[in-house]
Image: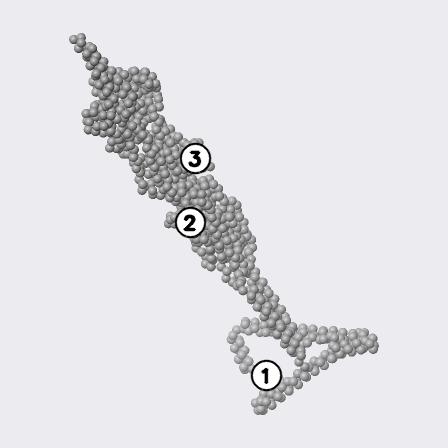
Amino acid sequence: MKKIIKTVTTLIVMLLVLVSVFATIIPTSSAKFSDIYSCYSIIKIDYDTDAANDPFLPVDMVKEIPTTLTYYVEGYFDEEVPPYYSYLDNFIYLYIVEKPDWCTVTVTPNFLKIKATPEGLTENVSLIVKVDENAHALSIGKIGIKVEVDSMGAIKGGTFHSNISFIPGYYPLLNLNIPDGTVKKIGPLDTAKFDIEIENMGNAKTIVICDVLDLPEGWVVSVDQETIIGTGTISDNPKKTVSLVIQPPYGVGYHNDRETIQVSITPAYFNDPSITGEKYLVSFTIQSKGFSTPGFEAAFAIFALIGVALVFKHRKNKNNKGGKQP
Amino acid sequence: MKHIKLLAVFLVGIFILSSTLPSTAAQSDDSKLIEKMLMAWFSLRVGMFGSPYFVLRFTEPEAFIAEPSTIGIEYLNQTTITIGAIYPSTGGYRSLQDENYMPDSLMVGHDFEFKLEVPDYVPEDAFIAHFSPQQLVGGDTGNLKATLIITSNIPKDATLPRNIQLRINITKYTTFGNLYLPEKDRRGIFLSLLKGNKGLPRITWFYYATFSGHPFGRLYSGKRLLEFCSYVDIVVKLDRFHLADVIPLKRVEVGPDQLTSIPIEIRNLGSHVDTFNFRVSSSKGSELIVSPPPAITLGPNEVGYTSVGVASPLTFLDPGTAHSINIEAYSIYEPEAIFNNTATVITRGIYISEMNAAYAAILFVLLLIAVAFILFRKKRIIEENLKKPEKPWTIPIEQKHLEELKKKDRNEYEKERLMMEDEYKSAMLWYNSYLQSIRQEKRKEKSKQLNSKVTKFFKKPEKKKEKSKEKEKQPKKEKKPVEKVEKTIKEEKVKETPEIVKEQYKTIQKKSEEMQQRKEKALLKIKHAQEKQKRKIKK
């Protein structure tokens, strides 16, 4: 009986020793053995490309890019291990790690709790993008997202990166300057020249379209209808001067014509002139005052002088002939 | 001894098994038995406190969201945002009575605090945040959500950056109880098992809470500690609003027919870079021609200068008229919002049209020419009818005679010369008096003609008829002898041949002219003689 008790006692002690040995020595000494249960977290990020690639107006608009995040686990025991953690959600953190200087991006929500499954579970997040006027129109903006997944027991965490691209729209903005003022007094045979300094403050190469509105009868206005101006967003020269030449009516006679001539200046996107901005209006007041001669008065005066000289000569000849008579 | 040998064999076997088991499991796919053994081992370890598969969490972060996540802010307005924790599955807000937030013996309290984090680039106090409620406590009624009211108090002269991002920090605090012992209902192996708790070896709790590498009992018992900190980012969109202050800088005074500019100051009080177009209109009835200033682009709080073009009316005499010009500025992005002001222009002065002046000058010259022509013509006619007397000493024969006389007799010469002078003077006197008499006669004739015209004009037509009748009734007066002679000649003309009559008529006319000239000369001589006599008598 004593032997049996001794044997049982020895077995129990040995069992305890074995358990403690397994519990302490094996996992630390052999990493491979513990990894056999490991399930690795995988994150997949998809976003609405249509929404992202639809150009949106800088400054005034805020774009929301719907993004889906799918979380699943992979591993040898990916079917068996995750159910042990089904009572827990894994923690997933989202960060914006890369973005252009000319935009503001946030992700909402920036923290998710998703259960680890081999099939995968999906959560929706939104990227909120706001672009300022320095964004070059229709260039591609890249947003880098970092997703960190916490480790949870045998389910290993990880860090994942994804890029989302979007397109800012065309933001037309001009700054006009007329250094010589908008009022001029000229003669009927003169022309009034106004220089319009145009600065493209928009975010793309721009065509500036000039149109004369309600041209008064008899007046002639000459202006470059289309002028191409670069943009500062790509270090191009954003300034150009457009000349407007106004010619008043010049019919023979006295003139005192005073008119206001209005010109509209419209910015349009260089690569697609159908995308235009608002109209900028510029008005000029011109007074044409004075006599307008036909232009051949000098020739007329010369002919008249010649005529007078001929008449005098003829008379002189006649007198001379008369004097000779007896 | 026998048992010791058996024990040694058993131990060696166990060691061999433990070292070969992982490779065996990796190599064989269909070894279900080994997998089952391994999973049995895993299931034993996963719940074991302290094992690498055991999950011990002291913090449970929550997913917070903000609704809306993008806000538009204007000057001095309020924006309300709801911040709360959601159930990912339903999207609804978590309840404060969720099991995670209910107090127990280990964690006796859970509470949440909210704070708005404003970036450094935003002016201080530009956004005033107020959370309602300011603190949420687990176990209370209601949801885990708070309302944030942001009042914008952006200084007028401040220029905000284009992109603003606000961050709301949500901090969860947990107040711990006695962590040295597990929960009351989980204390003891058998009691815990009986209560349905899965085999957690609670007997080791105290050991781990006190002596383990992470002695949580000693670290956290009885303390309120930060459990986690979440954040929610909000994109702030400064809502575009348009406001401008248009100030005419001075009152302008202009004369008629002048072009001038009225300087205008415009300040962009809106939120963004804005472009303003202008409209101008002058007061009703004013003949001012006004042109609006050109479009101007200004940044927030930027001041720009432009001008209104004015052409004053062509008023002949303007003692001083005030004209008001209404200046309207509007953003090209919102033409409906109009910002206006009034500028005043005073026109004063006299205007003489260059054209009228030119016409007047031409007319004056023409008039002068006409007058000169008439005078010249009159003079010519008079000269033709009546020749001006010549100075006798300028007549060549008389000149010669005087020279000879001068040589012969000086006294006679002097007398002769004086006589000539007297003769010339008397001739001139006669000439002038004759001219005057002619003019008087012409004036009389003209006055008579005028009188007859006036009387004819004022006479009644009946009287005229009567007069004419009377005239008819009256016997015809006898004609003068000349008329009679003419008549007889005319009668004779009929009788005689026309050629003879013509010749006779011409000779008669010549004779009468000669007679007339002789008469005039005789008269002149008589007058000269009379004047000589008069002078002699006087001497």
Which mark lies nearer to you, 3 or 1?
Answer: 3
**Of helix, strand and loop, which one carries label 3?**
loop
Instruction: Look at the picture and state if B19 lies above or below B387.
Output: above
Does label 3 or label 1 sit earlier along the sequence? 3
Q: Do circles 1 and 2 both sit on a common chain?
A: no
In the rendered image, which quarter contains the N terminus of chain B? top left
Task: Specify the subunit that label 3 lies on.
Answer: B
Task: Specify the subunit that label 2 lies on.
Answer: A
**Of helix, strand and loop, which one carries label 1?**
loop
Q: Residue B229 vs residue B526: left or right?
A: left
Residue marked by disc 2: A207
Which mark lies nearer to you, 2 or 3?
Answer: 2
The amino acid pointed to by label 2 is Ile
Q: Is residue B490 visible?
A: yes
Residue marked by disc 1: B477
Q: Residue A322: x, y in percent?
A: 65, 78
The amino acid pointed to by label 3 is Ile
Task: Specify the subunit that label 1 lies on.
Answer: B
Residue marked by disc 3: B154
Q: Residue B151: x, y in percent?
A: 39, 33
How packed mark 1 is, by other alpha carbons closer than 10 Å (few <14, some 14-19, many 20 or more), is: few
